[in-house]
Image (cartoon, grey):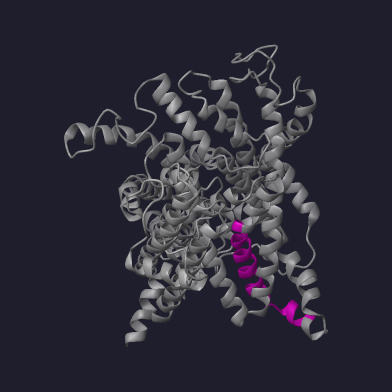
Amino acid sequence: MQRYLFRKLITYMLAFFVGVTIDWGIPHLMPGDPIQNLLSRFSLTSSSYAALYHDFAQSFGLNVPLWQQYLDFWKGVLTGNMGISVWAAPAKVTTLVFNSMPYTLALLIPATVLSYVIGNRLGAAAARRKYLDNSVLPLGYIFQAIPYPWLALVVPYLLGSVWHVFPISFGYDQGLTPAWNWTFIASLLDHWFLPFLTVFIVSLGGWAIGMRNLVIYELENDSSRYLRALGASERVVRRYAYRNASLPQLSGLALQLGVLIGGNIVTEIAFNYPGLGHLIFQAITNNDYFLLQGIFIFIVIGVLVANFIIDLVFVSVDPRTRLSMQGASA
Amino acid sequence: MSESVSDAPQVPRPGAIPAVAPEVAAVGLPGGPGPVSAVPGRRRSDFAYYGLRNKKLVFGLSLELLLVLFAIIGPMIAKYPPREITGFPVQHPGTRFWLGTDMLGEDLFSQLANGLRESYLVGVLGAGSAALVGMTLGFIAGWRGGILDEALQLLTNIIVMIPSLVLLVVIGSYMSAKSVLFEGVFIGLTTWPWVARAVRAQTFSLRGREFVDLAKLSGKRPLSIIVSEIAPNMASYLFLVVILLFGSSMLLAASYDFLGLGPTNVVSLGWTMNQAQANAALIYHWWWWFIPPGAVLTAMVAALLVANVGLDEVFNPKLREQ
């Protein structure tokens, strides 16, 4: 148990290290000079340009050797100071990220959790039951095969353009100013539903099919046969099969996190939804390195935190890790 | 203990999606009935017998073959090149333009046929490069074990946690022009950990078998043991993993192309959807612009998935319908 968590911790730390290093490398890989881009907005004489350039290089910390910049970057990451956005100056990168993050989380968390739970239940129910299986299985394959961008076009087309049930873009009614009143919250929910629905549907099929197959395996297992031989009812056998099948599904969820975030970005772009994915594209079109760095690091941290949570759930669900924990303390 | 559970091979669900290549995941479960049989001689006639009688395999394979044929013949029978401006903007589907035209007057049938071809190309490149890297590292880690194995596990765990789409955005903006080859190989280089995990787990469980010991005793080199003793025993399983990666590569590519990160100057299904979105086809009800590319892509991947399950049932008697 302790060894397990220890290894996991090392993996997380290394992943974080790699993530931060890649993140730091981003501006050095991207074309263009950020300060030059910033200064090109103003008409300057060459002498004042040089002076301003020097000033900006100093304030962005770009006039020191590379290794120093790297260490400074780490300092910034660890103290939560990611600098100032070039595009939305003088807004701080962290402020921009924190303003967008709620939108992304509000899409990603409910869609992921609900599709995981409902998909698994559906799949488990369909396993070895002819009637349910005949509808869940084909639908599952189709859902699993749908490309994110297509669903993000078809769903708003039908429910927005054709039937006018939901708005098809933006995070809230653009005539409103964000405030905590019912009109605004209602508008938020109204705009939230379609993006949520598409992310939910795309993920559903995979979980259902995965669980169906795992439960079929479990029902054929010796442990299930033994249970039946003991006279356990089919309901009890299924319950044990479900619990066993949950473990690989859970580790599958951890593996999918990075992919899920990618899909979420597609959805945000398609719906013009003001989350992190949307912000990334703004950072790119404006050559805003600092913003891009900030978003990237927050996404990496998000994936790591989600992984850690899944690890904790895993440990509490898996009887073997629980047992070895007791064994270690005894 | 629980580490072994997380070794259960998973294949990324495409398009940036969760799809725990279910069948495969199940097959690789520790303690589960693996597809790995120590029977050296495969009963090929058996596979053919069950294969032809497996409705899922026959259906999936036929649909896939039809689509491949379309990808080959379609561009030839299209009346216009995909980017040619015909002078008839926003035509409904009809006899002259089978799938209508877009806002510039480009023939959408031609774009669909050419995009399909592009998708298959990216799928083959993505699955191929992922299989190459994943198999190499998976065999090495599974065979050698020890430090090498630990290092590989760490590497795969880290790669899985780095958001590849964001990475592509960055690398993409650094390159002035991208090719289909680049997109395919990039996808492969971000999805290989799934192959590596699967191959590693299987190699690990096979290397302790008697027939492998026998091969070692007879003085065979490790490479030839892997190629002639271990690989054949997981061939069917590997095949399934690669098929799933093929589908997921096509879906991932569609997402990248939709975001405008795809190959430059290439017509792809994702690119067509991107154009439809950018030109507000949703608001003007130009459904023929964005419905066909996604529908065809869904059919392509769904057919692959169905054929894959059929194959799984053929290879693995325990899965056959009762």
Identity of the residue drawn at 48% across and 61% down: A248
Q: Quadrant of residue B177?
A: top right
Q: Position of residue A208 (x, y in %)?
A: 47, 47
Q: Position of residue B308 (x, y in %)?
A: 65, 48
Find the residue positioned furthest to the bottom.
A330
Dominant secondary-structure state across the stretch colored magenta? helix
Residue B197 part of the magenta-drawn span? yes
Q: Is residue B211 above or below residue B87?
A: below
Residue span colored magenta? B190-215
Q: Does any portion of residue B58 appear in the rendered image?
A: no
Identity of the residue drawn at 68% across and 63% down: B133
Q: Is residue B291 left or right of residue A195?
A: right
Residue A276 part of the magenta-drawn span? no
Q: Is residue A48 above or below residue A274?
A: below
Q: Quadrant of residue A233?
A: bottom left
Residue in front for this viewpoint, A57 or A143: A57
Q: Position of residue A314 (x, y in %)?
A: 39, 66
Q: Is residue A250 above or below residue A5?
A: above
Q: How many marks?
A: 0
Q: Position of residue A50 (x, y in %)?
A: 47, 55
